Image: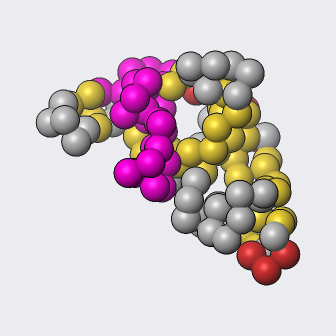
Amino acid sequence: MKPTINLTSRNNIVLTEHLSNRLQSLKKNDIVIARSPQDPCVLICKRITGMEGDVVHTAEQKTIKVPKGHVWLTGDNCDNSVDSRTYGTVPSGLILGKVCYKLYPFSEFGPVN
C-alpha cells in the first residue's frame, strides 16, 4: 500500500479492528486487510474504492457494477498493484479488518487515513 502504509519501509506494523466488517460499517476509502482472492493463504492490504451497488470505471474503459456482498479493492500505488483491476470484485467475507493505526516504524506512528 505504497505510499500510505509503506512510506519509508517494507516492514510495517499496523493495528486493525475487526468490528467494522462484522457490523457492516465499512465504507469507501477505508483501508482493509483481506485474504487474497487469488490465494487465501496470502493477506492483502488495499483501499475500498467501491461498495456493493457502486459502478466502477476501469482504465480499460469497462464499467463494472459491484454485486451484493462484494467490494472493489485497489492499492494506492496504481501503477504497481495487483487488486480488483486484476481479480475483479472481492467478496466482503474475505475482509478481516480495517486498518486504524500505523505502529511501526515509530517515525510514522499514528492514525491511518
> Where does the magenta region start and end?
65-89
Q: Position of residue 47 (x, y in %)?
A: 53, 48
Q: How many marks?
A: 0
108 left or right of 113?
right
Q: Is residue 97 visible?
A: yes
The residue located at (43%, 24%) in the rendering is 87
Q: Is residue 109 above or below residue 68?
A: below
The residue located at (68%, 19%) in the rendering is 40
Q: Position of residue 27 (x, y in %)?
A: 53, 47
Q: Is residue 76 above or below residue 68?
A: below
Q: Is residue 39 above or below residue 108?
A: above
Q: Quadrant location of residue 94?
A: top right
112 left or right of 19?
left
Q: Position of residue 15 (x, y in %)?
A: 82, 55
Task: Reply yes or no: does residue 74 show up in magenta.
Answer: yes
Residue with the most extreme bottom position = 107
Q: Quadrant location of residue 112?
A: bottom right
The residue located at (49%, 48%) in the rendering is 75
Q: Is residue 93 visible?
A: no
Q: 68 or 37, which is in the foreground?
A: 37
Task: Reply yes or no: does residue 75 show up in magenta.
Answer: yes
The residue located at (71%, 65%) in the rendering is 9
Q: Quadrant location of residue 97?
A: top right
Q: Quadrant of the C terminus?
A: bottom right
Q: 91 or 108, which is in the foreground?
A: 108
Q: Quadrant of the N terminus?
A: bottom right
